[in-house]
Amino acid sequence: MSHNTFGVGAVPPPPPGYPPPPPGPPARSGRSRIWPLVLAAGIIGAVLASATAAIVTVQARGTTAALPESVAPVTITVAAPTPAPPAPLPVEQADRQTCQEGFLATQAPTKSATDALAVLPAGMKVLDPAVQQNPEWASAVRSAGSFYTQASDVLHEKIAPGTTPVLAEAANTTAKAFRVLGDSYTKLLGGLTVKPCSTN
């Protein structure tokens, strides 16, 4: 066996007396092999881009169709902050204001209540059944009740911040007493009747 000394891929020389072999096909350059790869990459890229566009379009259509026709506005209610209490006045000024603007202001409504009750006969009590049966007397008692309620409101509003605790408590107690008296007079004769209990 003989060794090839011409190298790999080399064509041996022709035997003596024969013409040289015709040249083979021209050697391919590296550029001629790249174009099929570029074409394949372009086709794959176009397929991927069209698939992505189709998916995005389908998803976008699906989300817009799921929204309701008309969306109601959302209303959030926030409670208003409580106002800060008024700054307390000096004690002497607060006491004077509570007495002059509070207690003295109740004199007119309480006098009007007393005058309204003057139509009742001497010695007749408000709870007397005869008062409920007489429209004039019942109206006088209701009117007195509204005057006592007015006195309660005036006194309660005029208690000045910074008033001595004893005076403030006395004013609050008096205002509550006027309120109870006014409510009882107006509601006592406001159409409420007491039915006797039946014993069967």
Image (cartoon, rainbow, N blue to C red):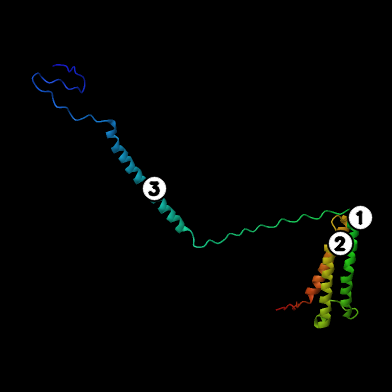
Residue 88's place in the image compared with 5, above or below, is below
Which quarter of the figure has residue 79? bottom right
Q: Nearer the viewer, residue 187 or 40?
A: 40
Q: Quadrant of the C terminus?
A: bottom right
Q: Earlier in the sequence, mark 3 or mark 2?
A: 3
Residue identifier under label 3: 52
Residues marked 3 and 1 touching at CB (< 8 Å): no
**CA–CA distance in space, label 3 to label 1:** 84 Å
Instruction: From the top left corner, tell me how far across and down residue 5 is, in percent.
Output: 18, 16
Q: Earlier in the sequence, mark 3 or mark 1?
A: 3
Instruction: From the top left corner, tell me how far across and down residue 94 is, in percent.
Output: 88, 57
Which quarter of the figure has residue 39? top left
Residue identifier under label 1: 92
Residue identifier under label 2: 171
Q: Residue at x 10, y 23 (%)?
A: 19
Q: Nearer the viewer, residue 139 or 158?
A: 158
**CA–CA distance in space, label 2 to label 1:** 16 Å
134 vs 49, left or right, is right
Q: Residue at x 84, y 80 (%)?
A: 137
For the residue labelled by badge 3, is the local secondary structure a helix, a strand or a loop?
Answer: helix
Q: Amino acid at mark 3?
A: Thr
Q: How many marks?
A: 3
For the residue labelled by badge 2, is the local secondary structure a helix, a strand or a loop?
Answer: helix
For the residue labelled by badge 1, is the local secondary structure a helix, a strand or a loop?
Answer: helix
